[in-house]
Amino acid sequence: MDKNKLALKRTQLARDRTILAMIRTSISLMLPGIAFIGFADKSKIFYPIGMTSIIIGIFFLILTVRFYIKHNNGLSIYFD
C-alpha cells in the first residue's frame, strides 16, 4: 500500500477518534445538568446550574457536528 494512502487512513482514524472524544465530552457535560435539574425542587440554585450545563453540552455537540462536516468534506477529496 502506498505511504500516502496509509497517511490519509491514519489521519481519518485520528479524526474519528477526536470526534468520538468530543461527543463523549458533550455528553459528560449534559449528564450532570440532568442530575442537577432532578434536584431542582429541593434548591433553586440547582436548576440554573443544570440548564447551563445542558446548554453548554448541546453547544459543544453542535460544534462537534460542524467540525465533522468540515473535516469530512475536506479529507474525502483524497480518497477514491
Image (spheres, rainbow, N blue to C red):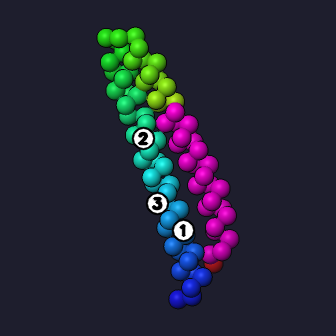
Residue 64, numbered circle: none
Which labelled disc corresponds to residue 27? 2
Seen at 55% across and 69% down, the residue is 11
Which amino acid, mark 2? Ile
- Vertical position of residue 72 compared to residue 35: above or below: below
Q: Secondary structure at mark 2?
A: helix
Q: Residue at x 49, y 57 (%)?
A: 18
Is residue 35 found inside the magenta-colored segment of the image? no
Q: Could you tell whether 34 is left or right of 77 in the image? A: left
Disc 1 and disc 2: Cα gap in Å? 23 Å
Residue 71 location, quadrant = bottom right
Range drawn in magenta: 56-79
Query: Label 1's element?
Result: helix
The amino acid type, in three-letter code, at marker 3 is Arg
- For marks 1 and 2 on the same chain, the one whose residue lies earlier in the sequence: 1
Q: Earlier in the sequence, mark 2 or mark 3?
A: 3
Number of marks in the rendered image: 3
Q: Residues within 10 Å of mark 2 (few under 14, many from 20)?
A: some
Q: Residues within 10 Å of mark 1 (few under 14, many from 20)?
A: some
The location of residue 36, given as percent across then percent down, is 36, 23
Q: Picture coordinates of residue 2 (x, y %)?
A: 57, 88
- Tag of residue 12: 1
Query: Callout 3: few (<14), some (14-19), or many (20+) C-alpha neighbours within 10 Å?
Result: few
Task: Determine whether 33 is above or below 59 in the image.
Answer: above
Point 38% across, 34% down: residue: 31
> Could you give the CA–CA distance between mark 2 and mark 3, rounded to whole angstroms?
15 Å
Which SS type dominates the magenta stretch? helix
Q: Which residue is mark 3?
A: 17
- The answer to if 72 sits in the magenta stretch is yes
Query: x, y percentage for residue 66?
Result: 62, 49
